Each structure stands twice: as structure tokens, then as C-alpha cells.
Amino acid sequence: MDHWDEIRTAYHVARAGTVSGAADSLGIHHATVIRHVDSLEARMGVKLFQRHARGYTPTEAGADLARIASTTEEQFAQLGTRLKGQGEDVSGEVVITALASFSPRLTPVLAAFQHAHPNTLIRLRTGLRLFRLEYGEAHVAIRAGQAPQEPDNVAQRFLSMDLSLHVSPDYVARYGLPTEGTLDQHRFIGGDDIHSRAPFARWMAKSIPDDNVTFRVTDDMSMQQALLSGAGVGFAVRGEHPDLIEIMPPQPEWRSDFWLVTHVDLHRTAKVQAVLSWLKDAAKTWADTDPAVSLPD
């Protein structure tokens, strides 16, 4: 790391493919870029780039260096998020991650939080990827499923949601109304990951023939859209989509648990505690008004 500037320069040359592109990205003179690369190659005793008229192409060693440097630069950038979260006031960037299907419920709550704390910048990151709290990718993660096990994270049970099995009127018009006794005669919507640990996915894997799962998706929002579009039988939070037809009521093994997860280094900061308190208050309101939502005992 004594020579991080040179390594970082080489990484940007590999990414841009030219000295001028790296210079523009880093805001330095192109002669400095050449000097850094030449010095690094001499020090390491290995050729990092093939020079040609159109630019620089990484050698195998250069590509290895670029991969490592990319990760290191990303971690340095994410460190800033963690450091910014350690103040005693509720201001600056607040990063929350959740499933995309949870955002319609979550977004109004975060907007109200920002109205109460106008000096904050809210980032809501959605998707199936588990954002790494230890690298500062998020201040608070809302995760579904089993209790998170990462040793440096603090996990608190947030709420549970009851899922039931539904079809859309369009599906019924084409294929008829499924019943509990005829499920093996109908089309289903499932995840693309056949090894998913989601409770409803485990039930489907053991209860529904694989050939019946004719529409597979990679994320939870697409799963909801496929269900609403009549692609097949699928799961949804009970009562969330009034136009859907419920064909099986919630089962205990389908219940989805949600957790509030924070990193131990940031858990006690004013900013994180304020967000957690706001989210817990919102969960109480949901539980009072939505029979599909329940709070931990």
C-alpha cells in the first residue's frame, strides 16, 4: 500500500485502455500516468501492459492487479459511508437496503423520516444482493428469511408477513380456477434459484412438480408482476393485491420473517438509532392496520 497511487493509476489504465482516459479519470497529467505505470512495472519486475498504437492492453499480470485494485478502491470508497455514519447528529447520507417488493411500503416511511430530518440524504438500495454492512454498503438492511448469522452484525426481528397462494382473473379465464386438490394441474411462478431458502420456495419445491413451474424470475418484484399478469399461480402478501384471487390461505410454513440488520460499529450511532426507531414505529402502524403483518412477541 506504500505505492497505492501507482497501483490505482495502473487500474485506471486497464479500465480505460488508454493513458489519456486514465489521466482524465484521475485528474492528473498523462505524463504522470506513464511514470506511475513504468515505475510500478520496474518495481514489480513484471510487464503489466502491452503497448500498441490504440492504447494499453493488460497482460495477465495486469488484469490480476486491476481486479485486486478495483476491489480495494471500492472498499476505500465505502469506508466513507461508515465514517459518515458515526456522527452524533441525524444528518448526511442514510443508506437502507431491502427487497424491491418491500419498497412500496418502505418508501413513504423513509420520505417521512427525511421530512423530520431534512439534512439527510436517503439512499434506498433494493434487490436480492446482500449488501455488505462491514464495507459500509448500507447503514440498515431489511432482510427476509432466517436470522442473519454474520458475527459483526446486529440482527433484530422486525416483523412477519403472511403469504397466501393467488391467481389473477386473467389466469382463471384461460386455465380455470385452481383448488387445493388440483394444484398439480396448474402453472406456477417460481424463482430462478431452485435452491432458494425462502419458506414458500421450499414448500413449492417439495409440493409442486418442477415441470409445473413454467415461469421463473430472478427477483421478487418480477414475481409479483408475473402473478398480476396471469403467468401462473404464485405467492403474495395476503390482501396486498385486491384484484388477485386467493386459492389457499396463509400457512405457517409460508410466513416470511423480516430482520433489521446493522453493523456493530454503527449500531449505536444517533443516525442509525433514529432510522431503527422510525422503522419500528412504522411496523407497529402496519400491524395495527394490516392483518397480514405481525410483530415479534
Image: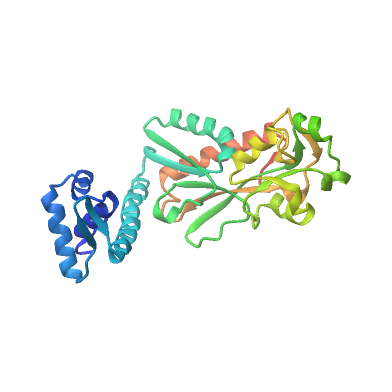
Q: Is 209 positioned to the left or the right of 95 in the image? A: right
In the displayed structure, 244 sits above or below 223; it is above
Which of the pair 280/179 is nearer the observer?
A: 179
Place of residue 149 in the rendered image (x, y in percent of width and height, measured from the top left): 55, 60
Q: Quadrant of the N terminus?
A: bottom left
Which of the pair 74/229 is nearer the observer?
A: 229
Q: What residue do we see at 50% from left, 62% from top?
A: 151
Place of residue 178 in the rendered image (x, y in percent of width and height, measured from the top left): 84, 39
Place of residue 160 in the rendered image (x, y in percent of width and height, measured from the top left): 67, 45
Q: Is 14 positioned to the left or the right of 246 in the image? A: left
Place of residue 161 in the rendered image (x, y in percent of width and height, measured from the top left): 68, 42
Report the coloring of the rendering.
rainbow
Q: What residue do we see at 51% from left, 52% from top?
A: 130
Q: What residue do we see at 80% from left, 29% from top?
A: 173
In the displayed structure, 42 sits above or below 239; it is below
Q: Which residue is at the far bottom?
A: 45
Q: Which quadrant of the structure image shows residue 38?
A: bottom left
Q: What residue do we see at 33% from left, 55% from top?
A: 70
Q: Which residue is at the far right?
A: 181
